[in-house]
Image (cartoon, rainbow, N blue to C red):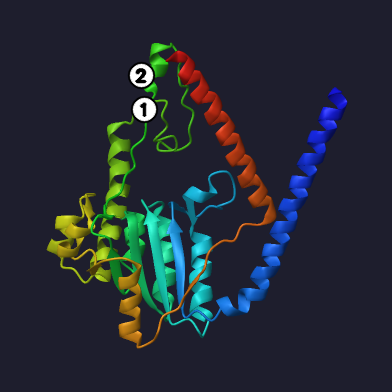
């Protein structure tokens, strides 16, 4: 009886898996057949969602990472496509690594296409760095933007290991080689060195925004202390050009290029393995959530 039950479950699993694969193949074929229609769009929409990094976006946390290599590739592809007249960067990101942000901004400035940044929920720090490189910035009145600053803070566990009578044996070649280790406190010399690097990055950030947004030195100094601003505030400070959303971004393109805009999205399309992995991860999440909820209910 038990063997029959297991056999039934195996059959059900295989049938479901086969149906899933068949559905994926069918949708892929439909996408290929419709691909010719899709490429007639004349405005490329490129999402920048999540933390901006130079690393790969593969893995469990891929949905929270904006890979600069992918985004630069989409910008270059759109730039080389004759039918594409403009690029909209759809931004929903708190920022990320300076190099990754600069790579995207540089690719955008090399492009010969009209560009618009559309800031949705958030476009701060490195994401704003990128937005400033576009021809026009649109944000919702409640969007978060700005945050022109640099952070290098970290946790210091030296007090914790001292409390547990754990020692850190320092063996280095070069006095700064282990600067920043969480296992000992910074010396005054090391702190000054780190602050100097952070100040250099901050000045670079300020200079780029000042140039891109055509601001004066006093203007950038007043808004570049790491503070974030609502879209309604950012407009008056010169950080954005317009309050609005996708309609306003498209209208800017249509009015400036005298075209009727039709958007086409440039983004990563998941393969079969990623689809299956996502389903498994989601299933595991809900199983774990159900168990946690049940335990919480018992505690109550």
Callout 1 touching callout 2 (CB < 8 Å):
yes
From this viewpoint, which residue is outermost toward the bottom?
258
User: x%, y% of residue 45?
Assistant: 45, 69
Does residue 105 show up? no
Q: Quadrant of residue 163?
A: top left
On the image, the x and y values in percent for residue 209 come to 27, 64
Which residue in the protein does label 1 denote?
Answer: 156
Q: Secondary structure at mark 1?
A: loop
Relative horizontal placement of residue 136, taking residue 237 as reference (left or right): right
Q: Nearer the viewer, residue 24 or 264?
A: 24
Residue at 43% across, 51% down: 50
Image-quadrant location for residue 211: bottom left
Pointer 2 residue: 159
Which image quarter is the N terminus in?
A: top right
Q: Nearer the viewer, residue 56 or 15?
A: 15
Q: Residue at x 53, y 68 (%)?
A: 73
Q: How many marks?
A: 2
Left-right relation of 166 to 194: right
Q: Nearer the viewer, residue 215 or 187?
A: 215
Residue 80 vertical placement versus 277 (above, below): below
Q: Is residue 209 visible from the viewing direction of this image? A: yes
Furthest residue to the front? 1
> Residue at horizontal 42%, vertical 32%?
181
Q: Residue at x 51, y 50 (%)?
A: 63
The answer to whether residue 144 is above or below residue 72 is above
């Amino acid at each position: 009886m038990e063997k029959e039950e297991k056999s039934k479950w195996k059959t059900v699993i295989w049938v479901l898996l086969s149906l899933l694969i068949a559905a994926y193949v069918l949708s892929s074929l439909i996408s290929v057949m419709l691909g010719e229609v899709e490429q007639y769009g004349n405005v490329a929409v490129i999402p920048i969602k999540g933390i901006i990094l130079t690393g790969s976006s593969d893995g469990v946390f891929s949905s929270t990472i904006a890979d600069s290599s992918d985004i630069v590739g989409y910008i270059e592809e759109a730039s080389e496509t004759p039918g594409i007249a403009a690029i909209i960067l759809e931004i929903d990101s708190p920022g990320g690594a300076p190099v990754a942000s600069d790579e995207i901004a540089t690719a955008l400035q090399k492009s010969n296409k009209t560009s618009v940044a559309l800031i949705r929920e958030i476009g701060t720090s490195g994401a704003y760095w990128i937005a400033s490189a576009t021809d026009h910035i649109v944000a919702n009145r409640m969007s978060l933007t700005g945050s022109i600053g640099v952070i290098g803070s970290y946790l210091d566990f030296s007090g914790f290991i001292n409390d547990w009578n754990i020692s850190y044996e320092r063996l280095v070649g070069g006095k700064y080689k282990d600067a920043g280790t969480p296992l000992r406190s910074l010396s005054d010399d090391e702190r000054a060195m780190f602050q100097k690097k952070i100040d250099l990055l901050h000045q670079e950030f300020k200079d780029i925004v000042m140039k891109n947004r055509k601001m004066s030195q006093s203007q950038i100094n007043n808004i570049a202390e790491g503070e974030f601003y609502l879209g309604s505030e950012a407009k008056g400070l010169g950080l954005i050009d317009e309050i609005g959303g996708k309609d306003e971004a498209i209208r800017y393109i249509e009015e400036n290029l005298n075209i009727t805009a039709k958007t086409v999205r440039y983004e990563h399309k998941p393969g079969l393995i990623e689809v299956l992995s996502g389903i498994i991860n989601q299933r595991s999440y809900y199983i774990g959530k159900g168990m946690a909820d049940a335990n919480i209910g018992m505690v109550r």
